[in-house]
Structures are given as C-alpha cells and as structure tokens.
Amino acid sequence: MTPGTTPSPRSVPRVELGDEALTERIHTGMREVEELLVRELSKGPDFVSEKVLHLAQAGGKRFRPLMALLASEYGPRQGSENVVKAAAIVEMVHLATLYHDDVMDEADKRRGVESANARWGNSVAILAGDILLSHTSRLMSELDTDTVAHFAETFGELVTGQMRETIGAGDSDPIEHYMQVIKEKTGVLIASAGYLGARHSGASDEIVSAMYRLGGDIGIVFQIIDDMIDIFSDAKESGKTPGTDLREGVFTLPVLYALEEDTAVGEELRGMLTGPLTDDAEVARALELLARSTGRERSMEVVYKYLAEADKEIALLPESAATTALGTLARYTVDRVG
C-alpha cells in the first residue's frame, strides 16, 4: 500500500435472495459496509493499517453484515447509515476475534493467506486485534449508548466462550460444554447482527428480540455444520483439508457423539483420540471410523432441532421477501455437508 493512500474495497459477491429488489438493496448495503470497513481500518499510521486490513481484504463470507442488513428490512430505515455502521461493527468485532484466535491456535493460514501471527509475530497480531476493537468502539460511539452496552455484554460472552474452550470441559459433560462454547463464540455475534440491524432500522421491540434469537439459532447451526464439513466433506468440494480439527486435538460434536458409542468403532476412537493426531495415516483412520459412526446422524438431529427453533422465530416475522430469504438462509448451510 502506498503511504497515505486508502486501498480500494474488495468486490462484494452478489447474493441472490429470491427477490430482485431485495437482492439489489442488500447488495448495495454490502458494498457500503465494505467501503466503510476499508475507510475506517485505513485510519492511523500505515504500519498499523497494513496489519488491520490484512484479514479484512483477504476475503470472508461477510455473513454477519448480511444478517444485519436483512434484519433491517423490518424497520422504516432499512439499509440506513446507522444500519451500515452496525453491520460494519459486527464484522470488525469478528475480525478482531480471528486475530486473537490465530495466536492461541498458532495458526499459519487464515482465509487462504498467511495469518497475521505467522507473518508479523504474536505480539503484532494481538495488537492488530486490539486496534480493530478501538475502531469498533469509535463507530459504536457514533450510534448510541444502548449499542455500547449491548456490545459490552456480547464481547463478554465471546471472551467467556473462548476461555471456556481453552480451559476445557473438565468434569462437565463434553457435549453440553461444546454447545455452550459455540453459543458463546459463534451464536452470540450473529445474534447481535440480527439485533442491531433490526434495532437501527427502527423495527419494533418484538422484531428486534425475534431477530436476536433467530441469529443465535442460525449461528449455532452454522458452527455445527462447519465442524461437520471438517470431517465428512470432500476436500475438493469444501476447499478445506479434512481432519484439521483432529490434528489440533479439537473434538467437535460428531466426534464427541462417536466417542460415546458403545461399539467397536467407539472403542477404537477412544483409544486413538487422546490428543492431537500428528500422523496422516491416523487421521485417515479416524475419519474412516467417524464415517461409520452415528456422529453425523446425531449431529444432524441437533441441527434440525435448532432449525425448528429458527422457524419459530421466522413465524413471528411479517410475510415478506426478507422473511422468505431468512428461511432459505437458515437451511442453506445444511447442504454444504457432502
């Protein structure tokens, strides 16, 4: 980046939402969020902005801003300046957690590029995440104190979830522990996207509350499915290396269910999965065993349970193109498991 210049925002993919007018409004909003992200994160000395723009420009689905913009369809100020700021805030908090997560996980790659910690070291990566939070705080101050208070609660839950995961289940039930972690680490921020998008569009309190709960349900579904993709999907289709979580010693929902089995498969897995798997042959064997287990089936039962909860919230929303799109969005991710 040339000193003193602001980089161009990346091109935002157009998400087809089943209604031309809705698709155009959301696409316009997503472009505005992207422009605000780049403009905001370019502030400060170049040696700082280079680091904080690193992951923002690397890509990402921008699912949280999409959720905020869809939630704003239920108020008279849909896609307004404050809605765009709220959507950008949620994405910046998400980006900050990625910098910090990569340090804790000692990750080498993120979004297909070198992680900040691998490129500049742990200290710089942590500070880049902190700078992102400072940008977030400034934008929140331009909205209102309710938004600040809301994010104080949200960030507290995010950190609690990360600490809960770091400490481990201990003597508690590992499946209950897993579900609480993904609620706090993933569900709460998507819930916030729904809450803030609806609230800053002027939607009713009932709609704001429904969008918060809906976002939480969708977030939990997305995380479970992401974890299943790591085990059950073809690498060519998912773009991910199968068994990454196993190599890191992270046991997700389908693994935990498989480990519970009183079968030969469960017994062999319990003997293998005592920590990270470092041998390719062991990873391949574990994936083979997991495919034969009930882990996938039982995990999908949980997914459908949360989809049913999401349907209850969607039923509270008025009939509209946005409501139809939210229903489709809630189910879209399930098809990603090969």
Image: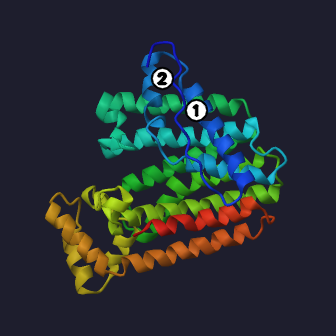
Q: Quadrant of residue 103?
A: top left
- Asked if the residues shown at circle 1 and circle 2 are in contact, with their CB atoms under 8 angstroms apart, the answer is no
Query: Around disc 1, counting alpha carbons within 10 Å, would you say few (fewer than 14), some (14 to 19), or many (20 or more)?
Result: many
Q: Which amino acid does label 1 sit on?
A: Leu
Task: Tell me if 177 is positioned left or right of 75 in this view.
Answer: left
User: How many numbered discs?
Assistant: 2
Task: Name which residue type carries label 2.
Answer: Ser
- Does the image show residue 177? yes
Location of residue 324 in the rendering, given as x and y in whole percent from the top left corner = 70, 65
Tell me: 210 left or right of 265. Answer: right
Check the picture and name the quadrant holding the C terminus: bottom left
Q: Is residue 77 above or below residue 71?
A: above
Q: Which residue is drawn at 78% across and 46% down?
A: 78
Which mark, residue 291?
none
- Secondary structure under tag 1 reads helix
45 lies left or right of 265: right
| Residue 328, image x, y percentages | 62, 66
User: Which callout, 1 or 2, points at the residue further toward the start of the chain?
Assistant: 1
Q: Where is residue 127 in the image (x, y as percent from the top left)?
A: 43, 28
Residue at disc 2, secondary structure:
helix
Q: Where is residue 62 in the image (x, y as percent from the top left)?
A: 55, 46
Residue 144 visible? The answer is no
Residue at the (36%, 81%) spot, across then down: 294
The extreme top residue here reads 4
Residue drawn at 48 percent across, 53 percent down: 161
Q: In which quarter of the image is the N terminus?
A: top left
For disc 2, the neighbor class at 10 Å (few under 14, some 14 to 19, many from 20) is many
The circle on residue 37 is 1
User: Which residue is tagged 2?
Assistant: 49
Give me the C-alpha separation between circle 1 and circle 2.
Answer: 11 Å
> Which residue is located at x 76 percent, y 55 percent?
208
